[in-house]
Image (cartoon, rainbow, N blue to C red):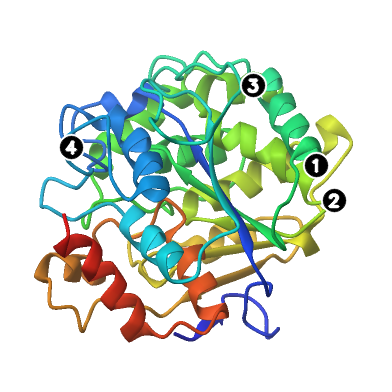
Amino acid sequence: MKTYNIFTNEKDSLPTGKADFLLAASVTKTCEIEGITQAGIPGMIPLTPTLDAEFIINERVYSLGELAETPTGVPTPAIITRAVHNLVPFSTIEILDLGLQTIPQNSASHNFDIQPSDSIATGAKIDAKAVFRKGMAAGESYELKGNYLILAESTPSGTTTAAATALALGYECKNEFSSSFLNVPNNIRDETINKALSLIDENMSNFEKLSLISDNMLIFCAGFLMSASRRFHIVLAGGTQMAACLLVADKLREDVLMRVKNENITLATTSWVANDKNSDIAHILSLLSYKPHAVYTSFSFEQSTIPILKKYDEGEAKEGVGAGAALGYACANEVNNAKLLEAIERILYSM
């Protein structure tokens, strides 16, 4: 399972040793717009991050009788992350509740008194400055148990809010964000983003814009990165959403007179995102004021005996719940593709 650095010729790897795993889980009511996402069970999309949280910690869900999957039957990337944990356990797995409708059961969660955000089409109604400050405080106080931290996300329709956020902050990256769909529903996404952008104007501050057109995960994690990166290495686990998190943190550096310590940050994603023809994570990351360290893994389901998993290779689901970083963590701990595939399939066969 070779890893590739997207931008540099540095040694392609994650840090060595054990990693803590934090899942930033949140709900934006943008996910309730019909047809905008397939990251979960139709009609129950806001439950997806709760189910993901329960599964990666317990290898079972409590808040529903079944694990989240797309309408075509593709299971959540949480199965990848959990399979890695079964093979080479993380030091700890904990949940950051950044606005969930349903609290995960039997799961170690940190509550920050953050409510689910509204749809960006009508205004997210976030106190962005307060959420960012909570993120910074959490980054300052977090006690690392292992050698470094993997910070992941589960936010359905988060690529839409990420795209709107980046555009609102002045980044030139239209139509460069990925989707859980094989074929991105651009008409629905574009309509939603255009409605969101119509709510802001150039006289607004960055925080005022974020309050209207972003999501809690992006804002909180940007603050968390700002402070935590000064103390230890963070692997930002995800695709274009986490790339947008870096854009947010970079844009806010003049507002808070601080910037991320970028040499302590690695973005790790899947090959399904890095090679996606409908998005361009490499260009999104190139908009940062510094040259980031970013890797993706070559793992695939080509040899899988479970046909539905091959849809990942065809472009469905792609990323989420820290799958890309988990794959990189497995690679760093010398777990080969065959062993990892077997562990993933074992999970599905046991369900």
| Residue 19 image offset from top left, x and y in percent | 62, 61
Numbered disc total: 4
What amino acid is at disc 3? Ala
| Residue 301 image offset from top left, x and y in percent | 25, 76
| Residue 284 image offset from top left, x and y in percent | 55, 57
How far apart marks 2 and 4 lie (CA) works out to 39 Å
The residue identified by callout 4 is 41
What amino acid is at disc 1? Ser
Q: How crowded is mark 3: few (under 14 residues within 10 Å), some or many (20 or more)?
A: many
Nearer-the-camera pick, 210 or 16: 16
What amino acid is at disc 4? Ile
Identity of the residue drawn at 18% across and 56% down: 74
How far apart marks 4 and 1 lie (CA) works out to 36 Å
How far apart marks 4 and 3 lie (CA) works out to 29 Å
Q: Earlier in the sequence, mark 2 or mark 4?
A: 4
Q: Which of marks 4 and 3 is nearer the N terminus?
A: 4
**Which secondary structure lies at badge 1?**
helix
Quadrant of the image containing the C terminus? bottom left
The residue identified by callout 1 is 227
Quadrant of the image containing the N terminus? bottom left
Q: Is residue 254 left or right of residue 81?
A: right
CB atoms of marks 2 and 4 within 8 Å: no
**Which secondary structure lies at badge 4?**
loop
Q: Residues within 10 Å of mark 1 (few under 14, many from 20)?
A: many
The residue identified by callout 3 is 128
Identity of the residue drawn at 49% across and 55% down: 238
CB atoms of marks 1 and 2 within 8 Å: yes
Q: Which of marks 2 and 3 is nearer the N terminus?
A: 3
Residue 230's disc is 2
Q: Is residue 310 above or below residue 155?
A: below
